[in-house]
Amino acid sequence: MGSKTRFEMLVRFGLTIWLGSWAFAACGQSVEESAEWGAGEVYGAPHPRAALRVRAHIGGFVCPMQLDTGANAAVIWHDWNDRRAGAESAPGPDVNVEFVGIRKQMATTLAFYGRLSHCDGAEVVGTLGSGFFDQGTLTVDTRAPAVRYQAGGALAGNPEAQIMVYLRIGAQGGVPLVQLRGPDAVVRYALLDTGSAALEWVVPSEADWLRATGKSALTDVDVQHFEVSAWGRMLPCVSARAPMSLRIGNVDIDRPRVTYCTAANNNNSQGTAGVIGLEPFFGRIVVFDFVSNLWLVGARPQ
Protein backbone atom coordinates (compact mmCIF):
# COMPACT_ATOMS: atom_id res chain seq x y z
CA MET A 1 0.00 0.00 0.00
CA GLY A 2 1.12 3.56 -0.48
CA SER A 3 2.46 5.20 -3.59
CA LYS A 4 5.84 3.51 -3.28
CA THR A 5 4.38 0.00 -3.26
CA ARG A 6 1.65 0.62 -5.81
CA PHE A 7 -0.85 -0.98 -3.47
CA GLU A 8 -3.52 -2.14 -5.89
CA MET A 9 -7.07 -2.50 -4.74
CA LEU A 10 -9.97 -2.30 -7.07
CA VAL A 11 -9.91 0.58 -9.55
CA ARG A 12 -9.29 -1.01 -12.93
CA PHE A 13 -7.92 1.13 -15.74
CA GLY A 14 -4.81 1.40 -17.91
CA LEU A 15 -3.40 -0.02 -21.10
CA THR A 16 -4.55 -3.66 -21.13
CA ILE A 17 -4.56 -4.70 -24.78
CA TRP A 18 -4.40 -8.47 -24.91
CA LEU A 19 -2.85 -9.89 -28.06
CA GLY A 20 -2.34 -13.58 -27.36
CA SER A 21 -0.73 -16.01 -24.97
CA TRP A 22 1.19 -19.23 -24.76
CA ALA A 23 1.62 -21.37 -21.65
CA PHE A 24 4.95 -23.16 -21.58
CA ALA A 25 4.57 -25.07 -18.31
CA ALA A 26 3.62 -28.58 -19.31
CA CYS A 27 0.42 -29.92 -17.80
CA GLY A 28 1.25 -31.65 -14.51
CA GLN A 29 4.58 -29.84 -14.15
CA SER A 30 4.95 -26.76 -11.96
CA VAL A 31 7.27 -23.79 -12.25
CA GLU A 32 8.18 -21.82 -9.12
CA GLU A 33 9.56 -18.29 -8.82
CA SER A 34 10.51 -16.32 -5.75
CA ALA A 35 8.45 -13.30 -4.74
CA GLU A 36 8.88 -10.48 -2.27
CA TRP A 37 6.72 -8.36 -0.02
CA GLY A 38 6.60 -4.66 -0.67
CA ALA A 39 6.30 -2.56 2.47
CA GLY A 40 3.96 0.38 2.76
CA GLU A 41 1.42 2.10 4.96
CA VAL A 42 -1.73 0.22 5.92
CA TYR A 43 -4.27 1.47 8.46
CA GLY A 44 -2.10 4.56 8.79
CA ALA A 45 0.97 2.65 9.99
CA PRO A 46 3.93 0.88 8.35
CA HIS A 47 3.18 -2.66 7.22
CA PRO A 48 5.80 -5.11 5.88
CA ARG A 49 3.36 -6.90 3.52
CA ALA A 50 1.47 -4.19 1.66
CA ALA A 51 1.95 -5.71 -1.81
CA LEU A 52 3.07 -9.03 -3.31
CA ARG A 53 5.77 -8.41 -5.90
CA VAL A 54 7.41 -10.65 -8.46
CA ARG A 55 10.03 -10.15 -11.16
CA ALA A 56 8.95 -10.85 -14.71
CA HIS A 57 10.94 -10.88 -17.94
CA ILE A 58 9.59 -8.11 -20.17
CA GLY A 59 11.07 -7.64 -23.61
CA GLY A 60 14.50 -8.79 -22.45
CA PHE A 61 14.45 -6.84 -19.18
CA VAL A 62 13.68 -8.11 -15.67
CA CYS A 63 11.11 -5.83 -14.08
CA PRO A 64 9.17 -5.77 -10.79
CA MET A 65 5.42 -6.35 -11.10
CA GLN A 66 2.59 -6.80 -8.63
CA LEU A 67 0.60 -10.03 -8.50
CA ASP A 68 -3.05 -9.06 -8.19
CA THR A 69 -5.83 -11.62 -8.60
CA GLY A 70 -8.33 -8.80 -8.10
CA ALA A 71 -7.37 -7.50 -11.57
CA ASN A 72 -9.06 -9.42 -14.35
CA ALA A 73 -6.71 -8.51 -17.20
CA ALA A 74 -3.56 -10.54 -17.79
CA VAL A 75 -1.26 -7.51 -17.70
CA ILE A 76 -1.93 -3.89 -16.75
CA TRP A 77 0.85 -1.39 -17.29
CA HIS A 78 1.33 1.29 -14.64
CA ASP A 79 1.43 4.11 -17.16
CA TRP A 80 -0.91 6.59 -15.48
CA ASN A 81 1.88 9.12 -14.89
CA ASP A 82 2.53 9.16 -18.64
CA ARG A 83 -1.13 9.85 -19.34
CA ARG A 84 -1.37 12.56 -16.69
CA ALA A 85 1.67 14.30 -18.12
CA GLY A 86 0.26 14.05 -21.64
CA ALA A 87 3.16 11.85 -22.74
CA GLU A 88 3.25 10.46 -26.25
CA SER A 89 0.71 7.64 -26.53
CA ALA A 90 1.73 6.39 -29.96
CA PRO A 91 1.99 2.61 -30.14
CA GLY A 92 5.31 1.12 -29.15
CA PRO A 93 6.76 -2.32 -29.86
CA ASP A 94 4.96 -5.40 -28.61
CA VAL A 95 6.78 -7.14 -25.76
CA ASN A 96 6.68 -10.64 -24.31
CA VAL A 97 5.86 -10.80 -20.60
CA GLU A 98 7.22 -14.05 -19.09
CA PHE A 99 6.72 -15.42 -15.60
CA VAL A 100 6.45 -18.96 -14.10
CA GLY A 101 6.62 -20.53 -17.57
CA ILE A 102 3.85 -18.38 -19.05
CA ARG A 103 4.45 -15.96 -21.89
CA LYS A 104 2.00 -13.34 -23.10
CA GLN A 105 2.54 -10.81 -25.84
CA MET A 106 1.45 -7.30 -24.89
CA ALA A 107 1.21 -3.92 -26.57
CA THR A 108 3.03 -0.87 -25.21
CA THR A 109 3.19 2.85 -25.89
CA LEU A 110 6.41 4.50 -26.99
CA ALA A 111 6.66 6.43 -23.72
CA PHE A 112 6.21 3.33 -21.59
CA TYR A 113 8.51 1.17 -23.69
CA GLY A 114 11.27 3.74 -23.34
CA ARG A 115 11.30 3.24 -19.57
CA LEU A 116 11.56 -0.55 -19.58
CA SER A 117 15.35 -0.47 -19.92
CA HIS A 118 15.45 1.27 -16.50
CA CYS A 119 12.94 -1.00 -14.75
CA ASP A 120 15.34 -2.79 -12.42
CA GLY A 121 14.62 -0.47 -9.49
CA ALA A 122 11.95 -0.62 -6.81
CA GLU A 123 9.11 0.90 -8.83
CA VAL A 124 6.55 -1.62 -10.05
CA VAL A 125 5.96 -1.30 -13.81
CA GLY A 126 2.73 -3.27 -14.05
CA THR A 127 0.30 -5.80 -12.64
CA LEU A 128 -0.12 -9.50 -13.39
CA GLY A 129 -3.83 -10.20 -13.00
CA SER A 130 -5.88 -13.38 -12.90
CA GLY A 131 -6.07 -13.47 -16.69
CA PHE A 132 -2.34 -14.22 -16.76
CA PHE A 133 -2.81 -17.48 -14.85
CA ASP A 134 -6.31 -18.66 -15.76
CA GLN A 135 -5.22 -21.62 -17.88
CA GLY A 136 -3.86 -23.40 -14.82
CA THR A 137 -3.32 -23.43 -11.07
CA LEU A 138 -1.61 -20.62 -9.18
CA THR A 139 -0.10 -21.24 -5.73
CA VAL A 140 0.97 -18.38 -3.48
CA ASP A 141 3.25 -19.26 -0.56
CA THR A 142 2.70 -16.27 1.70
CA ARG A 143 5.56 -16.97 4.07
CA ALA A 144 8.48 -17.62 1.68
CA PRO A 145 7.11 -15.76 -0.27
CA ALA A 146 7.00 -17.63 -3.57
CA VAL A 147 4.67 -18.23 -6.51
CA ARG A 148 4.13 -21.52 -8.31
CA TYR A 149 2.17 -22.24 -11.50
CA GLN A 150 0.98 -25.49 -13.03
CA ALA A 151 -0.83 -25.64 -16.37
CA GLY A 152 -4.26 -27.24 -16.05
CA GLY A 153 -6.26 -28.06 -12.95
CA ALA A 154 -4.59 -29.39 -9.79
CA LEU A 155 -7.31 -29.50 -7.11
CA ALA A 156 -10.00 -31.67 -8.68
CA GLY A 157 -10.63 -34.57 -6.30
CA ASN A 158 -8.89 -32.87 -3.37
CA PRO A 159 -11.29 -33.28 -0.40
CA GLU A 160 -10.01 -30.07 1.23
CA ALA A 161 -10.61 -27.89 -1.84
CA GLN A 162 -13.32 -25.26 -1.64
CA ILE A 163 -15.69 -23.89 -4.27
CA MET A 164 -14.39 -20.97 -6.31
CA VAL A 165 -16.21 -19.15 -9.09
CA TYR A 166 -13.96 -17.72 -11.76
CA LEU A 167 -16.08 -14.80 -12.89
CA ARG A 168 -15.06 -13.75 -16.38
CA ILE A 169 -15.15 -10.03 -17.10
CA GLY A 170 -14.91 -9.45 -20.83
CA ALA A 171 -12.37 -11.18 -23.03
CA GLN A 172 -9.30 -10.32 -20.98
CA GLY A 173 -9.85 -12.58 -17.98
CA GLY A 174 -11.78 -12.75 -14.74
CA VAL A 175 -11.57 -12.72 -10.96
CA PRO A 176 -11.85 -15.49 -8.32
CA LEU A 177 -14.91 -15.40 -6.06
CA VAL A 178 -14.94 -17.53 -2.90
CA GLN A 179 -17.63 -18.37 -0.38
CA LEU A 180 -18.01 -16.26 2.74
CA ARG A 181 -20.29 -16.90 5.71
CA GLY A 182 -21.18 -14.63 8.60
CA PRO A 183 -23.12 -15.39 11.79
CA ASP A 184 -26.32 -15.87 9.79
CA ALA A 185 -24.64 -18.78 7.90
CA VAL A 186 -25.85 -17.36 4.59
CA VAL A 187 -23.43 -18.14 1.76
CA ARG A 188 -22.14 -15.03 0.02
CA TYR A 189 -19.33 -14.59 -2.46
CA ALA A 190 -16.32 -12.28 -2.16
CA LEU A 191 -13.39 -11.52 -4.44
CA LEU A 192 -10.17 -13.19 -3.22
CA ASP A 193 -7.62 -10.49 -3.96
CA THR A 194 -3.86 -10.86 -3.63
CA GLY A 195 -3.60 -7.17 -4.55
CA SER A 196 -5.23 -6.28 -1.23
CA ALA A 197 -2.36 -8.05 0.49
CA ALA A 198 -2.50 -6.41 3.92
CA LEU A 199 -6.27 -6.13 4.24
CA GLU A 200 -8.77 -8.61 5.65
CA TRP A 201 -12.27 -7.73 4.44
CA VAL A 202 -13.09 -4.74 2.23
CA VAL A 203 -16.82 -4.12 1.85
CA PRO A 204 -18.32 -2.35 -1.17
CA SER A 205 -20.51 0.27 0.53
CA GLU A 206 -20.84 2.43 3.63
CA ALA A 207 -24.07 0.61 4.55
CA ASP A 208 -22.25 -2.75 4.39
CA TRP A 209 -19.48 -1.38 6.61
CA LEU A 210 -21.89 -0.01 9.22
CA ARG A 211 -23.80 -3.28 9.28
CA ALA A 212 -20.65 -5.44 9.60
CA THR A 213 -18.96 -3.32 12.27
CA GLY A 214 -22.05 -2.36 14.27
CA LYS A 215 -21.02 1.30 14.08
CA SER A 216 -23.57 4.08 13.72
CA ALA A 217 -21.36 6.37 11.62
CA LEU A 218 -17.97 6.54 9.91
CA THR A 219 -16.90 9.00 12.61
CA ASP A 220 -17.59 6.72 15.60
CA VAL A 221 -14.92 6.06 18.19
CA ASP A 222 -12.43 3.26 17.55
CA VAL A 223 -12.61 3.86 13.80
CA GLN A 224 -9.33 4.20 11.94
CA HIS A 225 -9.12 6.73 9.11
CA PHE A 226 -6.36 6.33 6.55
CA GLU A 227 -5.59 6.47 2.83
CA VAL A 228 -4.47 3.88 0.31
CA SER A 229 -2.85 4.33 -3.08
CA ALA A 230 -5.02 2.64 -5.69
CA TRP A 231 -4.01 2.70 -9.34
CA GLY A 232 -2.24 6.02 -9.10
CA ARG A 233 -4.60 7.93 -6.82
CA MET A 234 -5.23 8.16 -3.09
CA LEU A 235 -8.48 6.85 -1.60
CA PRO A 236 -9.77 7.73 1.88
CA CYS A 237 -10.70 4.64 3.91
CA VAL A 238 -12.13 3.70 7.30
CA SER A 239 -11.57 0.49 9.23
CA ALA A 240 -12.84 -1.17 12.41
CA ARG A 241 -13.11 -4.63 13.94
CA ALA A 242 -16.35 -6.55 13.41
CA PRO A 243 -17.97 -8.01 16.57
CA MET A 244 -18.35 -11.42 14.95
CA SER A 245 -16.50 -14.22 13.23
CA LEU A 246 -16.25 -14.76 9.51
CA ARG A 247 -15.76 -18.03 7.67
CA ILE A 248 -13.95 -17.90 4.34
CA GLY A 249 -13.98 -21.29 2.70
CA ASN A 250 -12.87 -23.49 5.59
CA VAL A 251 -10.94 -20.75 7.43
CA ASP A 252 -12.46 -18.96 10.43
CA ILE A 253 -11.49 -15.37 11.19
CA ASP A 254 -12.40 -13.97 14.59
CA ARG A 255 -13.38 -10.29 14.66
CA PRO A 256 -12.09 -9.48 11.18
CA ARG A 257 -10.94 -5.97 10.42
CA VAL A 258 -13.50 -4.46 8.02
CA THR A 259 -12.49 -1.68 5.65
CA TYR A 260 -14.49 0.64 3.43
CA CYS A 261 -12.85 3.04 0.99
CA THR A 262 -14.88 5.95 -0.32
CA ALA A 263 -14.61 6.97 -3.99
CA ALA A 264 -13.38 3.48 -4.92
CA ASN A 265 -14.58 2.19 -8.25
CA ASN A 266 -14.99 -1.43 -7.19
CA ASN A 267 -16.09 -2.71 -10.59
CA ASN A 268 -14.73 -6.21 -10.15
CA SER A 269 -16.51 -6.77 -6.81
CA GLN A 270 -19.91 -5.31 -7.68
CA GLY A 271 -22.77 -7.53 -6.53
CA THR A 272 -20.55 -9.41 -4.05
CA ALA A 273 -19.82 -9.25 -0.32
CA GLY A 274 -16.65 -7.32 -1.14
CA VAL A 275 -12.99 -8.28 -1.17
CA ILE A 276 -10.94 -10.67 0.96
CA GLY A 277 -7.24 -9.84 1.10
CA LEU A 278 -4.27 -12.07 1.87
CA GLU A 279 -3.72 -10.97 5.47
CA PRO A 280 -5.98 -13.68 7.01
CA PHE A 281 -3.91 -16.37 5.29
CA PHE A 282 -0.40 -15.20 6.09
CA GLY A 283 1.92 -18.12 6.86
CA ARG A 284 -0.05 -20.51 4.64
CA ILE A 285 -0.31 -21.38 0.98
CA VAL A 286 -3.26 -20.18 -1.06
CA VAL A 287 -4.06 -22.18 -4.21
CA PHE A 288 -6.23 -20.89 -7.08
CA ASP A 289 -7.32 -23.61 -9.51
CA PHE A 290 -8.84 -21.50 -12.28
CA VAL A 291 -9.54 -24.55 -14.44
CA SER A 292 -11.44 -26.64 -11.86
CA ASN A 293 -13.05 -23.63 -10.14
CA LEU A 294 -11.60 -24.63 -6.78
CA TRP A 295 -9.32 -23.03 -4.22
CA LEU A 296 -7.49 -24.15 -1.11
CA VAL A 297 -5.80 -22.72 1.95
CA GLY A 298 -3.24 -25.16 3.29
CA ALA A 299 -0.29 -25.50 5.58
CA ARG A 300 3.05 -24.53 4.11
CA PRO A 301 5.09 -27.62 3.15
CA GLN A 302 7.98 -28.26 5.50
Image: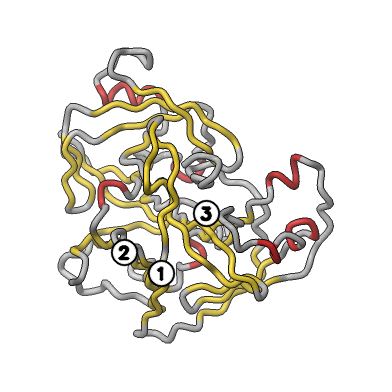
Mark 2, other Cα within 10 Å: few <14 / some 14–19 / many ≥20: some
Please name the residue that numbered disc 3 is placed on: 169
Circle 1 SS class: strand
- For the residues bearing labels 1 and 2, Cβ distance under 8 angstroms: yes
Give me the disc on residue 34: 1
Measure the C-alpha gap from mark 1 to mark 2: 8 Å
- For the residues bearing labels 1 and 3, Cβ distance under 8 angstroms: no
Q: Is residue 16 left or right of residue 292?
A: right
Indicate which disc, 1 or 2, sits on the residue closer to the N terminus. 1
Foreground mark, 3 or 2?
Answer: 2
> Is the residue 279 above or below the residue 166 in the image?
above
Residue 92 position in % (x across, y down): 79, 64
Circle 2 SS class: loop
Measure the C-alpha gap from mark 3 to mark 2: 31 Å
Q: Amino acid at mark 3?
A: Ile
Q: Is residue 16 left or right of residue 224?
A: right
Indicate which disc, 3 or 2, sits on the residue closer to the N terminus. 2
> Is the residue 276 above or below the residue 123 in the image?
above
Residue 51 position in % (x across, y down): 44, 50
Mark 3, other Cα within 10 Å: few <14 / some 14–19 / many ≥20: some
- The quarter holding residue 204 reads top left
Residue 34 position in % (x across, y down): 41, 69
Foreground mark, 1 or 3?
Answer: 1
Q: Amino acid at mark 1?
A: Ser
Give me the disc on residue 257: none
Measure the C-alpha gap from mark 1 to mark 3: 29 Å
Residue at 20% of width from left, 39% of height from top? 246
Circle 3 SS class: loop
Please name the residue that numbered disc 2 is placed on: 144
> Is the residue 301 above or below the residue 28 in the image?
above
Mark 1, other Cα within 10 Å: few <14 / some 14–19 / many ≥20: some
In front of the other: 94 or 152: 94
